[in-house]
Amino acid sequence: MSKIFDVAALDWQTVRPDVARQVFGKTLLDGQVKAVLTRVAPGGKFKMHRDAYAHLFYFVSGQGIVQVGDQQSVAHAGSVVQVDAGDLHSYENTGTEDLVLLSLNIPTQ
């Protein structure tokens, strides 16, 4: 079903408290592919974990560190991270402002 909506009208929801701290999301699409606008408060983080699906992270604003397996990199506006299903990954806000990213959860085929 097609729709148009204002993301500002959506409430921030706590994201995966089992592996995340101070991470909040607004679900934009919840179908076979899930799209979540994600906000990580200063000092917040997603701990190292694995998922049965792949990810694409597009960082919109803020500063942080992202890790996939043994690779670690600074995350900033314009950074893109691809995570294969089953790969260990994490990210954390190392800045003083919110770290904002678009997170796509992509099922394996």
Image (spheres, rainbow, N blue to C red):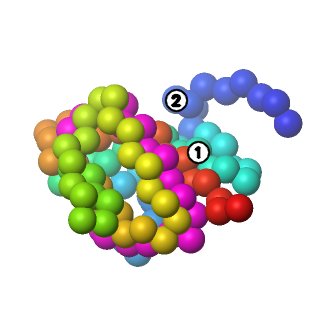
Q: Residue at x 21, y 48 (%)?
A: 73
For residue 63, above or below residue 16 = above
Q: Residue at x 47, y 40 (%)?
A: 102
Judge left or right: residue 24 versus residue 41.
right
**Nearer-the-camera pick, 50 or 60:** 50
Q: Which mark is residue 8?
A: 2
Q: Quadrant of the C terminus?
A: bottom right
Residue type at the position of mark 1 = Ala
Q: Is residue 3 visible?
A: yes
Mark count: 2
Q: Residue 77's image quarter?
A: top left
Magenta stretch bounds: 47-64
Q: Which residue is mark 1?
A: 35
Q: Is residue 22 visible?
A: no
Nearest to viewer (mark 1 / mark 2): 1
Residue type at the position of mark 2 = Ala
**Nearer-the-camera pick, 70 or 66:** 70
- Residue 51: x, y in percent? 50, 69
Q: Residue 17's image quarter?
A: bottom left
Please, which residue is most extreme toward the right here? Answer: 1
